[in-house]
Image (cartoon, coloured by chain):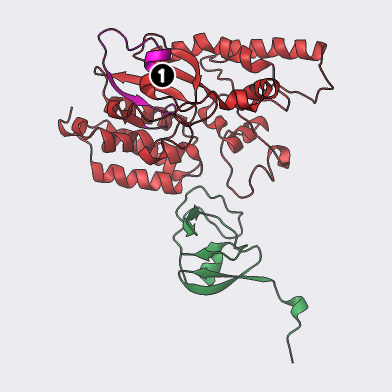
Amino acid sequence: MSQAQQTCASTEEAKTRQYAAPMAVHVWRGTCPRNSEYAASRKILEKELTALKADPPCELPPLHLRRGAGAYICGEESGMIESIQGHRGMPRLRPPFVAINGLWSRPTLEQNLETLHWVRDILEKGAEWFAEGGRHTRKGLRAFSVSGRVKKPGVHRAPAGITMRELIDEYCGGMLDGHEFYGYLTGGASGGILPARLANVPLDFDTLQEHGCFIGSAAMIVLSQYDTAKRAALNAMRFFAHESCGKCTPCRVGTAKAVQLMAQPVWELEKLNDLATVMVDASICGLGQAAPNPLKSVMKYFPEELKNGS
Amino acid sequence: MAANTEYMPATVEFTLNGKKISAYRGETILLAARRHSVEIPNLCYMDNRPPDGNCRSCMVEIEGERLCSRLAIDRRKRT
């Protein structure tokens, strides 16, 4: 994971520079004070906002840059709203939905920075330009953040619908020397893990659902023969146990319990399946609902790893 | 003599496990079910307190969607 974090830090600046210009609404940027992950982004945003206010292209709406209290859960829309309001970052029960009752009890629209980033290009260059960017019948462009056992990790702007194989070969300079492609985590920690034989699945929204995965943030982690899916899944589950906000029981207890079961040399599959079902069905927000994805992927696609009890 | 409907509390009808029951407006599914002798397991609910909805033991499925602490406000089927 340390390699992945380094990659994030080095590409963060370039990424944020692209994102800084097209913001048109109340903006809040998550920052993580624990490891100051996003300190560089904040500096860039502050600089660009000052420049924008000094020479506004049109009448500007009020823009606020808010420093987050720093937690994975604050990426959940209602958790982020709670955090902005000065409360603990915990998701709200729905209904009411944030589009009806959100920040300061007002109708709220939350947008991903990547979405806002593309708006300007699409307005300037036209929708056709953007749509032509896709591959394998998909449309548009996406910023893929690739880390793991590849020669050129980092954020790569690639066509939506590109396959993992193409992404590695064309954008990441291939696998590291001596490493063979074994599998990949789709969509960050919670997207799920796919084996090398599914390297030709187009990567886009809705294309991974049938394989039990989702693209999420398009953060891909490439595994080689020196990694195991089991270890990657345990690592992800430890992360979720750490980041669970503790509000609802299925997620708070479920992630911790799953870590204990997954740390055993032999997995008790029946118990893990039970746990996964409860977490998916009963957790309040996406964190707990998606946390069992890597676990389920290991059981589905890497059963041979579970046999030897390593 | 007909009852004076002005003073009757408004009710919402819904189907719970295949049985038609009615709830008062603003009543949760949990309480409406309890009045109709259907005990939904619960932990974090306490009488006279607003629902917290964090133990998730009273989860019910409403047309495929799984929910807890839900007010009985519409007429969809509960199973």
Kind of residue at disc 1: Leu
Range of residues picked out in magenta: A167-192
Crowd band around label 1 with a 10 angstrom C-alpha radius: few (<14), some (14–19), many (20+): many
Residue occupying the far bottom of the picture: B1
Instruction: Judge left or right: residue A306 versus residue A160.
Output: left
Q: Nearer the viewer, residue B47 or A207?
A: A207
Instruction: Judge left or right: residue A104 versus residue A297.
Output: right
- Is the residue A93 above or below the residue A147 in the image? below
Q: Residue A298 appears at what percent x and percent y?
A: 29, 34
In the image, the chain rendered in red is A
| Membership of A187 in magenta stretch | yes
| Membership of A194 in magenta stretch | no
In the image, the chain rendered in green is B
- Quarter-of-image position of residue B57: bottom left
- Is the residue A116 above or below the residue B55 in the image? above
Q: Dot 1 falls on which chain?
A: A
Residue bearing mark 1: A167
Q: Residue at x 27, y 20 (%)?
A: A227
Q: Residue A47 appears at what percent x and percent y?
A: 71, 9
- Quarter-of-image position of residue A21: top right
Instruction: Judge left or right: residue A65 versus residue A192.
Output: right
Q: Residue A257 appears at what percent x and percent y?
A: 34, 38
Q: Residue at x 49, y 39 (%)?
A: A286
Name the dominant secondary structure of the magenta segment.
loop
- Is the residue A294 above or below the residue A70 in the image? below
